[in-house]
Image (cartoon, rainbow, N blue to C red):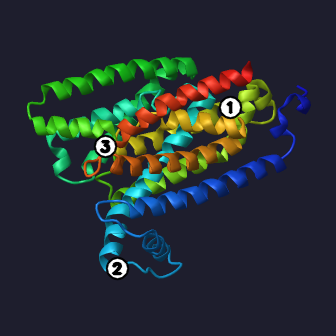
Amino acid sequence: MEVKYSNYPEWRLTRSPVLRRLSIGVMLLSIASILAAVLAASIGPLKIPFSHSFTTLIDVAGLGKSTAEPIEQAIIKSIRLPRICLAFIVGAALGISGGVMQGLFRNPMADPGIIGVSSGGAVGAVAAIASGLNTVSTLFLPFFAFLGSAITMSFVFLIASLGGRFSMSTLLLAGIAISSFLGAITTAIIILTDDLLLQRQIIFWIAGGFDTARWESVQIAGPIVFFGAFFTVFVARELNLILVSEDEARALGVRVYLVRNILLASASLTTGTAVAFSGIIAFVGLVVPHGVRLIVGADHRVLLPLSALGGGLFLLIADTAARIVLSPAELRVGVLTALIGAPFFIYLLLKSKARLA
């Protein structure tokens, strides 16, 4: 079969525009993320000067010495910095997973929880809270949430693979059906829980947040999300080819079935990890990749890394805003992302429609 490269978009013919867009995007998002981290470390019940926060972050990185007071250093290093890191990790996981799902399903409305991973994590976490197992160890709650996500993912994959042939449409439909079923189970557990305090804990977890962030959470979630994102970006070129034409991708040596499964498994793994440590946070994986795509195009070699950085930055800013918007009370970040994400997504849709007109 003869492949005519002229039929491919520009990203198939040259590397330099791709590298240029990726380099500029990474540089800008990295600078913005550092500034957002300094701001987040400074804001709280105890106001810390920006210069003290910046030098403390430099000190943590081993690049200098902090000028902050000991109490300020303790607050930043023990309380605020773990929260900053976890918010960025979760945002990156949701951002890159959303980009993968939108690409695989060829649908800009797809999000990381489309195949039921988020719903499975919710059932696991809610069951742990309702049974009191979360009081045994601080890691039991994310463990059961991740276990619920993993079991759900495995079950959905099994249904999609019945008959010896994997089907993306079956995967999507099975995910939607199982999400509805698991949502009913979550609701039933909340209703059947007599303890109002436990009900409140469940609702708070479902709304999403990082108030329980610890360094242990960062140390567990960080490597999982990093390796999941690494494998995802590693096969981004193959994803581009598959989206152009599966037949031509096979002719060029792409193992379509293997690449698709790697992407689905990586996206599900990172989403499950995010849900386990933050609860359900909506719209990050939907809005961020869509917004990045409108700016840099649909080349996944650029789109996926920038979606990860953009998702981390977006959620870090959202979590900082959630801490101060109702100060001294705290708004759940999942509520804030939904309030911001829904109007912004409508704006993106209208902007995209205007470009096509």
**Number of numbered callouts drawn:** 3
- For the residues marked 3 and 2, what is the alpha-carbon distance in whole angstroms? 29 Å
The outermost residue toward the left is: 194
Q: In front: 298, or 248?
A: 298
The answer to which of marks 1 and 3 sits earlier in the sequence is 1
User: Is 140 situated left or right of 161 in this image?
Assistant: left
* Residue name at image x 42 percent, y 58 percent: 40
Residue type at numbered disc 1: Val
Residue 303 can be seen, yes or no: yes
Under circle 1, the secondary element is helix
Closest to the camera, between mark 1 and mark 3, is: 3
Q: Position of residue 243 (x, y in %)?
A: 71, 28
Question: Toward which corner of the image does residue 217 lie, by quadrant?
Answer: bottom left
Which residue in the protein does label 3 denote?
A: 331
Residue for point 43% across, 81% down? 67
Residue at 9%, 35% in the rendered image: 195
Q: Earlier in the sequence, mark 3 or mark 2?
A: 2
Q: Amino acid at mark 3?
A: Leu
Q: Position of residue 321 (x, y in %)?
A: 40, 48
Q: Is residue 41 above or below residue 238?
A: below
Relative placement, left or right, of 326 versus 246 is: left
- Image coordinates for residue 357, horizontal then vertical, percent: 74, 18
Camera-side residue of 321 and 1: 321
Q: Quadrant of residue 176?
A: top left
- Residue annotated with mark 2: 69
Query: In the rendered image, which residue does mark 1 sit on?
Result: 256
